[in-house]
Amino acid sequence: MDCKRIGCSGRVQPNGTVPFAVCQECRSPNCLRCSAIHENQSCKKYQNSIQYKGSPGKIASCIARYGF
């Protein structure tokens, strides 16, 4: 699998049941479940964050509902 770090041409190799793999080129931990790099963020928080990314209607709704 290709590393998900922008600008990196490295590859990551899954290792058994571990949910992430470290790129040997840039040393970034790639999440195999999400097929992304989301350091310091759980898979659930990452998935929630991308649901709103690029969706102005959802963002406006969240701001109206929660005030942020």
Image (cartoon, rainbow, N blue to C red):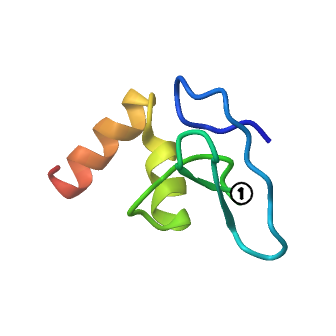
Q: Nearer the viewer, residue 21 or 58?
A: 21
Which x, y percent locates residue 12?
Answer: 73, 48
Which type of secondary structure does the marked residue at label 1 adopt? loop
* Other residues around mark 1 within 10 Å, as few (<14) / some (14–19) / many (≥20): some
Give the farthest residue toward the right: 16
The quadrant where residue 22 appears: bottom right
- Relative to residue 31, is residue 45 drawn left or right? left
Give the farthest residue toward the front: 25
Which x, y percent locates residue 7?
Answer: 53, 23
- Relative to residue 63, is residue 7 drawn left or right? right
Which x, y percent locates residue 68?
Answer: 17, 49
Q: Classify the position of the N terminus by image quarter.
A: top right
- Relative to residue 43, is residue 55 drawn left or right? left
Which x, y percent locates residue 60?
Answer: 29, 36
Q: Residue at x 25, y 54 (%)?
A: 65
Residue 34's place in the image compared with 18, above or below, is above
Q: Residue at x 66, y 39 (%)?
A: 3
Q: Which residue is mark 1?
A: 32
The kind of residue on which mark 1 rests is: Leu
Give the farthest residue toward the top: 7
